[in-house]
Image (tube, grey):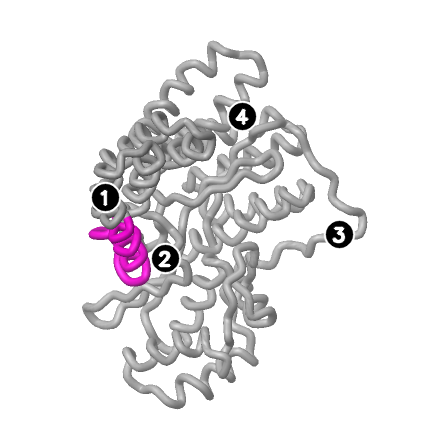
Amino acid sequence: MWTKWLGTLLLASSVVSAFAQPAPPPAPADVLAVPEPLRQQFREQVLAHARLPSARLERMVDFLFSPQGLGMRYEPDANHTVAEAYATRQANCMSFTLLTVALAREAGLEAYAQQVDETLAWRQDRNTLYRTQHVNAGVRIRERRFTVDVAWDEVITREPPERIRDERLIAHYYNNRAAELLEQGAVEDARRHAEIALDLDPGYATSWSNTGVIYLRGGDAARAKQAYQHALDLDHDNPGALFNLVTFYQRAGDREAARPLQKRLDAVQARDPFHHFLLAAGFERDGDLAQAAEHYRKAIQLYDGEHRFHFGLARVYFLQGDTRRAGKALAHARELSEGDTRALYQAKLDTLRRQGH
């Protein structure tokens, strides 16, 4: 799953149904635990037929997806433990990573989680803004390293993933469950999950920032402020904590305290290509093509290697009637892409060229 940072947009809370009773948090040791029926099925369908590590990895990946194996289905809200993923056959990126790491270790492989901090995937739901990070599974076989990623074609990144400890991976599970529970209005249950994440990985700034949002939703402004500040003590430029603390001070009417933090946040966002891409998409949607083009160009200037940035710029140029520059941007997008996406860009480019004759 995307590991979420939360941003408060409005200090309001929803009411959870009296009939909805979230389950208590599982013990951390249970999050990665492989249930015995899954272990037996894995032995029969994978381990009994593959001895070499590379063959086991290949067969394991097939086992995860094939109908004869687990037939796993991607579900973005499936924040599941390994046992829950097995029971439901559903997993998001985080749960899929848990499942893959656990099974790879059952196969005797060196497996670990990986995290990508700078990604583009965000959404706004009710009163909360979500900016996400991404996790996937890594496997090392002698000197070769492999990545197993259920969402490799959906996430935009500019840095390779970094290996993380199990404590961080399991903390991501509790963080994601906390965010899910907060959406449902189950603030106390969200807080319990968030505090387990802090116990597991107290040095992770995003967990502190998220927990601050939960404290604030629960009416504890003092603890929320402390959590945001601690996040910034751990990571001076953490965008989630900066956003949350700026919002906190602005809503409290303390503009003096908010001003220097806003400057820091502005500086962080100014050098973030994903921020400019989101702004560009918003301006494009609203019909402000000049602003959209400017922010697409800024995104490309900061990170030239993402085909979707160039494709966005091509769309805007086309809407402005500038087919020459649209074709140039589209050609860049094509060169940076592959497979079906590259073929799609080529078809659009061919259409543009025919229109030009």
Q: Which three-letter amino acid code belongs to the residue tagged 2?
A: Asp
Does the magenta run of residues contain 335? yes
Q: Which mark is residue 337?
A: none
> Along the polypeptide, which appears first: circle 4 or circle 2?
2
Q: Which three-letter amino acid code belongs to the residue tagged 4?
A: Lys
Q: Which three-letter amino acid code belongs to the residue tagged 3?
A: Ala
Q: Are marks 1 and 2 in contact (CB under 8 Å)?
A: no
Query: Is residue 236 visible in this depiction of the protein?
Result: no
Residue at the image point whose x is 63% and y is 47% from the top: 181
Q: Is residue 49 above or below residue 279?
A: below
In the picture of the structure, the residue carrying the numbered disc 1 is 356
Which residue in the rendered view is the most extreme toward the top? 256
Q: Secondary structure at mark 3?
A: loop
Q: What x and y, as percent, mark residue 122?
A: 46, 42
In the picture of the structure, the residue carrying the numbered disc 4 is 225
Q: Nearer the viewer, mark 4 or mark 1?
A: 1
In the picture of the structure, the residue carrying the numbered disc 2 is 153
> Which residues lie in the magenta part?
333-351
Q: Which three-letter amino acid code belongs to the residue tagged 1?
A: Gly
Left or right placement of residue 45 versus residue 301 in this view: right
The quadrant where residue 342 appears: bottom left
> Along the polypeptide, which appears first: circle 4 or circle 3?
3
Q: What x and y, as percent, mark residue 294?
A: 30, 28
